[in-house]
């Protein structure tokens, strides 16, 4: 009789333990889903704002005669890459969803990862190219530098895609709206990458996409600022006009320096965490849990695609003036269509 009671107590204890585990698992998934919903809402807002604001930036530069310069063409290229990145973030909700991946495979989602990585590289390389243009035009070859922005833009995009192509065969892709999680990662079935190869790729990404452009850009702007401040005023130049001209250049350089600073603040935490994982030998591929810190760092990096139009409008007076003209034309055209 006592054995039967002991057996019944053990069954009750086991069932209670399983019930508690199920309850804890449900609470875990509920908390993660709430967190993921907040993440997707913020990410979607950032992506939508990036598409609209960067398309408006392109329209201002393309339609206003006063904005047609070599530097502004490069700014338009950076705006185009940021707008594409914002669009792809929203397309991922469809083509990287669990339903689409199950029905159509991972090819489209993997391709989107290549494109969005290329846009990030293009923004970084364009930022460096602008800094080099400023350096050549002010320090190395004052008023004697000739450049073809379209040629540079084509080379930048080719380099961006060349560097990003290996991502197509990487280990993981994002997965949205699965039965358990709103956002997670999916392990590709037939990936060929070893752990060492993944670590090498992450290190290359840190150096090429972040560290090298940052170093080159910082040195270029430092030399430009030094040259502008130390440039002597010639006797043939009117002091007030020269000071006004130099002041405008300094403001423009400070605007680009702010862009570089925000780029550094946004991308540095993710790169440092990745670098720590590589150096410490931590596991790179882990699908069991998506840390909240990783989601925050992912959004922080993605938010860089919507910073630049705000900076242009706030700090660049000629752009602000032309942007207002463009906005008046857009609103006037829409009101005319409504009247008709």
Image (cartoon, grey):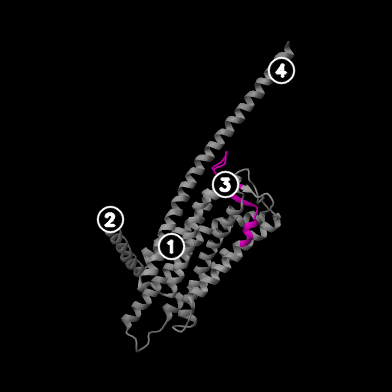
Compared with 247, 336 (above or below) is above
SS category of the residue bearing label 1: helix
Residue 14 in the image: state x and y as whole percent.
Answer: 67, 24
Q: What separation in Å lies between label 2 and label 4 (alpha carbons)?
A: 80 Å
Is residue 183 part of the magenta span, yes or no? yes
Q: Could you say which is closer to the camera, residue 14 or residue 279?
A: 14
SS category of the residue bearing label 4: helix
Which mark sits nearer the N-terminus, 3 or 4?
4
Which mark sits nearer the N-terminus, 4 or 1?
4
Seen as rendered, the residue at the extreme bottom is 236
Which label was assigned to residue 100? 3
Q: Which residue has dot 4 on it?
A: 7
- Residue 29 visible? The answer is yes
Q: Quadrant of the C terminus?
A: bottom left
Which mark sits nearer the N-terminus, 1 or 3?
3
Q: Which residue has dot 1 on it?
A: 308
Which mark sits nearer the N-terminus, 2 or 4?
4
Residue 71 in the image: state x and y as whole percent.
Answer: 44, 73
SS category of the residue bearing label 2: helix
Question: Do callouts 4 and 1 mark residues in contact (Cβ within 8 Å)?
Answer: no
Q: What separation in Å lies between label 1 and label 3 (alpha carbons)?
A: 33 Å
Region of the chain picked out in magenta, as a range: 165-185
Is residue 54 part of the magenta span, yes or no? no
Which mark sits nearer the N-terminus, 3 or 2?
3
């Amino acid at each position: 009789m006592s054995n039967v009671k002991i057996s019944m107590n053990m069954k009750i204890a086991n069932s209670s333990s399983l019930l508690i585990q199920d309850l804890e698992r449900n609470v875990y998934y509920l908390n993660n889903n709430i967190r993921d919903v907040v993440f997707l809402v913020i990410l979607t807002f950032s992506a939508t704002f990036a598409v609209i604001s960067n398309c408006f930036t392109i329209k201002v530069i393309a339609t206003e005669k006063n904005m047609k310069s070599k530097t502004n063409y490069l700014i338009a290229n950076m705006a185009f890459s940021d707008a594409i990145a914002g669009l792809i973030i929203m397309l991922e909700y469809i083509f990287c969803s669990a339903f689409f991946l199950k029905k159509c495979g991972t090819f489209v989602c993997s391709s989107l990862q290549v494109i969005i990585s290329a846009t990030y590289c293009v923004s970084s390389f364009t930022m460096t190219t602008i800094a080099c243009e400023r350096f050549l035009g002010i320090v190395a070859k004052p008023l004697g530098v000739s450049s073809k922005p379209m040629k540079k833009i084509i080379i930048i995009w080719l380099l961006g895609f060349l560097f990003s192509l290996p991502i197509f065969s990487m280990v993981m892709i994002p997965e949205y709206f699965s039965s358990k999680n709103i956002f997670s990662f999916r392990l590709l079935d037939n990936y060929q990458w070893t752990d060492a190869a993944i670590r090498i790729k992450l290190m290359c990404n840190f150096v090429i996409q972040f560290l090298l452009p940052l170093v080159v850009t910082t040195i270029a702007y430092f030399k430009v600022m030094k040259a502008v401040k130390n440039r002597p005023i010639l006797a043939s130049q009117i002091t007030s006009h020269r000071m006004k001209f130099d002041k405008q250049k300094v403001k423009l350089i400070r605007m680009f320096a702010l862009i570089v600073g925000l780029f550094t603040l946004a991308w540095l935490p993710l790169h440092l965490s990745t670098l720590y994982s590589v150096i410490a030998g931590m596991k790179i591929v882990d699908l069991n849990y998506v840390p909240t810190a990783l989601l925050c760092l992912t959004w922080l990096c993605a938010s860089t695609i919507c910073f630049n139009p705000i900076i242009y409008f706030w700090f660049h007076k000629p752009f602000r003036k032309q942007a207002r003209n463009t906005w008046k034309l857009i609103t006037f055209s829409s009101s005319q269509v409504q009247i008709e």
